[in-house]
């Protein structure tokens, strides 16, 4: 056994411990291995400091070295896997019905076009506009009851819509469906952000990677949901069968979460110093609302994110016009939407893994908004004719790439900008403020449909560019808040 001087042993041990604790290390340590690593480092250091100079150094055994060696990947916790699977199932059930709702209302129930638009608008408002309500309830009562209540309302809404035959009953069912999402979506998204931060602290794995997995699961559900609905329609089941299938998906989600989703007390495995700020007794009343909406940095994030959502809404507003102009029909829209979903499912995780370890969240947000702007600017530069769909495809690819960069970054910044006990409220407010911006922006951008294409797309490119400029004023974002750290003041 080799004998080393006391100072040399202490220095080597200290260096080894410091290397193990670095969050930016290329390989991440799993949560259960981290306490062992700290204990293994602390014990030899104390032993060397207390021992006489002639005492032999304690060398680690191969088994201890293996325990301290970082693993090649840090697997998500079971709770994170549950949240990710939840997002996947939510979108399968939802998109099995939504793409066919307008046709059912118009052709099946004979509603006028303006009434169809009103019903669809009410659904969007009851969902996106009320996210802040679901977020506040999550902060007050915890995620479990809010998610379960949202699933129950979604089941009831789909069942009601399947048999609704009058305008009043259709509107009531659609409002119920939208409000259900306003309950469970902020609860699940805020829990995903909170657990991503906790996972990052425990393993060093960037939170953006976890949130990217969450987004990719949602896109996979959005890709498979319409296929399920189409299959039911092809089999002759009709819109009613699609609604009932969506309801059954949420029955399965409800059953799974009633059994597997932990109560808030069990979810929060945080030190006692943090418990006072995150306890479920914290009530998100007017003080919490004032704290969130007076937070300048958070409001700037909302505005920057709104620029992205206004741009993303052009998939449904300006893109159909471009496809119609280039090809004479909108038949290619389905393929372009499938291209967008396929890109997210296949590229989201490797792209986020690459960006999360190399650039700060603010940089990813700015870069994503710039890529989205480039997608708008590229459309009028590509000639029509034989390559008629190339401008639209370029726009879809760049918009999707920008989305994959900026959405995990924006969601990952929220926990750095607000207190933990207000995370649900802030997550809902991010969607609600952005939804209001989209509602106002849709009317403004709709007026551009009659102007020349170069002018229209240049003005649209300015929207995400403005968001990128606003994002420059945000904090760069950290690798997770330290225990007891205060949020960035607004």
Image: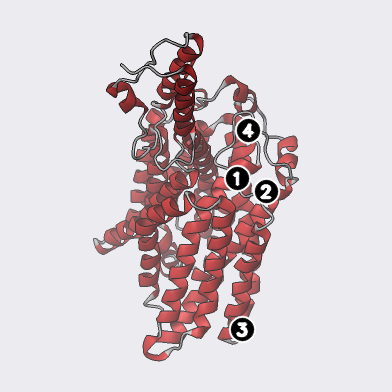
Mark 2 lies on a secondary structure that is helix
Instruction: Classify mark 3: residues with Cα within 10 Å, few (<14), some (14-19) or many (20+).
Output: some
Say whether disc 1 or disc 2 marks the residue closer to the N-terminus. Answer: 2
- Give me the residue at 59% from left, 41% from top: 415
Determine the residue positioned at 45% across, 24% down. Answer: 13
Crowd class of label 2 (few under 14; some 14 to 19; many from 20; radius 10 Å) = many
Residue carrying label 1: 414
Q: Kindly indicate whether the residue at mark 1 contacts the one at mark 4 (C-beta within 8 angstroms).
A: no
**Between 15 and 403, the one nearer to me in the picture:** 15
SS of the residue under disc 1: helix
Above/below status of 292 relative to 238: above
Give the residue pinned by disc 2: 298
Mark closer to the observer (4, 2): 2
Assess whether mark 2 and mark 3 are in contact (beta carbons under 8 angstroms). no
Q: Are marks 1 and 2 in contact (CB under 8 Å)?
A: yes
Q: Earlier in the sequence, mark 4 or mark 2?
A: 2
Sooner in the amino-acid sequence: mark 4 or mark 3: 4
Which residue has dot 3 on it?
455
Q: Position of residue 289 (x, y in %)?
A: 71, 41
Give coordinates of residue 130: x percent, y percent: 61, 48
Gap between marks 4 and 3 measured at Cα? 45 Å
Residue 156 relative to residue 457: left or right: left
Q: Earlier in the sequence, mark 1 or mark 3?
A: 1
């Amino acid at each position: 056994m080799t004998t080393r001087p006391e100072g040399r042993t202490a220095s080597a041990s200290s260096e080894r411990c410091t290397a193990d604790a670095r969050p930016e290390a290329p390989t991440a340590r799993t949560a259960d291995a981290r306490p062992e690593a700290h204990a293994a480092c602390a014990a030899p250091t104390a032993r060397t400091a207390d021992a006489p100079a002639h005492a032999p150094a304690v060398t680690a055994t191969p088994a201890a070295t293996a325990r301290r060696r970082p693993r090649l990947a840090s697997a998500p916790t079971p709770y994170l896997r549950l949240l990710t699977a939840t997002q996947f199932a939510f979108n399968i059930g939802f998109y099995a019905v939504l793409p066919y709702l307008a046709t059912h209302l118009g052709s099946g129930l004979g509603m006028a076009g303006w009434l169809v638009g009103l019903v669809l608008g009410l659904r969007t408002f009851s969902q996106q506009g009320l996210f802040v309500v679901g977020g506040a309830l999550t902060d007050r009562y915890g995620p479990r009851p809010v998610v379960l209540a949202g699933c129950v309302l979604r089941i009831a809404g789909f069942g009601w819509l399947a048999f609704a035959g009058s305008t009043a009953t259709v509107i009531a069912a659609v409002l119920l469906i939208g409000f259900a999402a306003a309950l469970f979506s902020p609860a699940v998204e805020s829990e995903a952000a909170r657990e991503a931060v906790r996972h990052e602290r425990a393993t060093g794995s960037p939170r953006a990677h976890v949130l990217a997995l969450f987004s990719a699961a949602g896109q996979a559900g959005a890709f498979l949901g319409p296929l399920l609905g189409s299959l039911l329609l092809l089999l002759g089941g009709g819109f009613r069968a699609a609604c009932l299938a969506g309801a059954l998906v949420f029955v399965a989600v409800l059953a799974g979460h009633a059994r597997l989703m932990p109560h808030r007390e069990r979810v929060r495995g945080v030190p006692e110093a943090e418990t006072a700020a995150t306890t479920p007794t914290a009530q998100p009343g007017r003080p919490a609302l004032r704290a969130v909406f007076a937070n300048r940095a958070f409001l700037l994030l909302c505005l920057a994110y709104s620029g992205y959502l206004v741009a993303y809404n052009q998939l449904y507003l300006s893109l159909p016009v471009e496809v119609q102009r280039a090809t004479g029909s909108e038949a290619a829209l389905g393929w372009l939407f499938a291209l967008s979903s396929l890109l997210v499912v296949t590229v989201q995780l490797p792209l986020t893994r690459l960006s999360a370890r190399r650039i700060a969240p603010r940089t990813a947000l700015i870069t994503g908004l710039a890529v989205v702007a480039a997608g708008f600017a590229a459309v009028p530069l590509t000639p029509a004719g034989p390559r008629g769909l190339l401008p639209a495809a370029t726009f879809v690819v760049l918009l999707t790439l920008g989305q994959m960069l900026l959405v995990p970054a924006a969601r990952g910044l929220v926990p750095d900008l607000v207190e933990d006990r207000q995370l649900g409220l802030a997550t809902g407010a991010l969607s609600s403020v952005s939804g209001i911006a989209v509602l106002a922006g849709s009317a403004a951008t709709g007026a551009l449909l009659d102007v020349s294409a170069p002018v229209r797309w240049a003005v649209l490119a300015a929207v995400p560019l403005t968001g990128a400029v606003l994002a420059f004023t945000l904090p760069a974002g950290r690798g997770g808040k330290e225990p007891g750290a205060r949020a960035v003041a607004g």
